[in-house]
Amino acid sequence: MITTTRIKEEFDLILLGLQKRGLDLRSELEDILAQDDIRKRTQKELDDTLHEARILSKEIGGLFKAGKKEEAEQAKSRTSALKAQEKVLHQKLAETEEALTEKLRHIPNVPHESVPKGTSDSDNEETERWGEAERSGEEHKPHWELAKTYGLIDFEAGVKITGAGFPVYTGKGAILQRALINFFLDRNVAAGYEEVLPPHFVNEDSAYGTGQLPDKEGQMYHITADDLYCIPTAEVPVTNLYRGDILKEEDLPKRNTAYTPCFRREAGSYGKDVRGLNRLHQFDKVEVVVVEHPDRSYQRLDHMVEHIGGLIKELEIPHRILRLCGGDLGFTSALTYDFEVWSRAQERWLEVSSVSNFESFQSNRLKLRYRPSDGGKPQLCHTLNGSALALPRILAALLENNQTESGIVIPKVLQPYTHFDLIQ
């Protein structure tokens, strides 16, 4: 979440930034500053009370020794009153801070200056396109038909076992899925990311730290008996590895990659948009997460975009990169690039990655800081993450774009992992 200090120092800039999201939050921000003033006054009153109580406590013994019993008793009485006042002020301060945090947690991140204005995905800005992505007019089978024809995915078995949105990968489909995971991990590690294998369930503090709570509470599976959440993305547990840490400036950046299954309750609309692998409740994804120095975070974002684009190029899938407009930007993001691959059979774009810079929005929630090398006061880090990559739509695009009369051709970079070059 954004800090009260930033709201106070950059009030007009923040208002303009949030307007890119289509939000006018002037009254909410003014209310936050007013609440922060109450907090500061209460804190000062508490500090003054504690200071006076400490001075009197030191004086009482001296007064008794000097034979000034009446003055000593008066000081003791005043100390007792101060202790009662201290208790009241502690309670008031806690309530004020809780109310302030509650107000702040509902304010989204401020979009970066490069984020275009807009209200929906139609206002997103295309920054790059690679490969041919044209409507050919030829008949191409969609991936759900190809999966059935070649015995790659059993959607009906998934419904029987669990329900819609939980596919069962079979035979060469399972091998191809595993090949993609290993390919992405190997490329990420070679690019300098340290691999981790995190838990697939997180507590409330972790979900709050990365901004899933309260924004996406209804989209996560909640295990009520243990008060745990199934992760919607590896971003949550991996970023929380650093929750509460004060890192050394020279140790930045921290770069991690992780493979995990991901769980999301939302089902979306009906029809082709959610058919087959287009939208699932459980899916596999490889993630990259970076904790970076604020001065270098946008340079790091550019490197991440280049790296992820390189992965899709190696798979030889036509794709484009979009800079999201304010209205399509996620709650926690300051700037997001979406990667979309072209589906020949469905003749539309399928999102396979979002790469975002959250600036200090997450780290403020996480209390994730670094100590400058000159020994100065700890400062908030910047956090970034991206899908490298989400598998369902990548697999869908591979099947649909590589279908031939002889079968489905496996990209060369995957053949060392699959140990076959054709599905037939």
Image (spheres, helix red, strand yellow):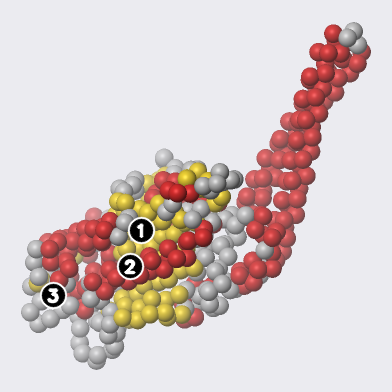
- Location of mark 2 (residue): 308
- In the rendered structure, the answer to whether residue 331 lies left or right of residue 17 reads left
- In the rendered structure, the answer to whether residue 63 lies left or right of residue 407 reads right
For disc 2, the neighbor class at 10 Å (few under 14, some 14 to 19, many from 20) is many
Q: Say which of marks 1 and 3 sits in front.
A: 1
- Location of mark 3 (residue): 408
The spot of residue 222 in percent (x, y) is 42, 49
Three-letter amino acid code of the residue under disc 1: Val
Q: Nearer the viewer, residue 381 or 327?
A: 381
Q: Nearer the viewer, residue 409 or 267?
A: 409
Question: Contact (CB < 8 A) between labels 1 and 2?
Answer: yes
Three-letter amino acid code of the residue under disc 3: Ile
The residue positioned 56% from the left and 77% from the top of the image is 117
SS at badge 2: helix
Q: How many marks?
A: 3
Q: Nearer the viewer, residue 180 or 232?
A: 180
Say whether disc 1 or disc 2 marks the residue closer to the N-terminus.
1
Three-letter amino acid code of the residue under disc 2: Ile
Say whether disc 1 or disc 3 marks the residue closer to the N-terminus.
1
Question: Residue 84, can we see it?
Answer: no
Say whether disc 2 or disc 3 marks the residue closer to the N-terminus.
2
- In the rendered structure, the answer to whether residue 135 lies left or right of residue 371 reads left
For disc 3, the neighbor class at 10 Å (few under 14, some 14 to 19, many from 20) is some
Q: In the drawing, what numbered circle is on residue 288? A: 1
The residue positioned 54% from the left and 57% from the top of the image is 361
SS at badge 3: strand
How far separated are the C-alphas under marks 2 and 3? 24 Å
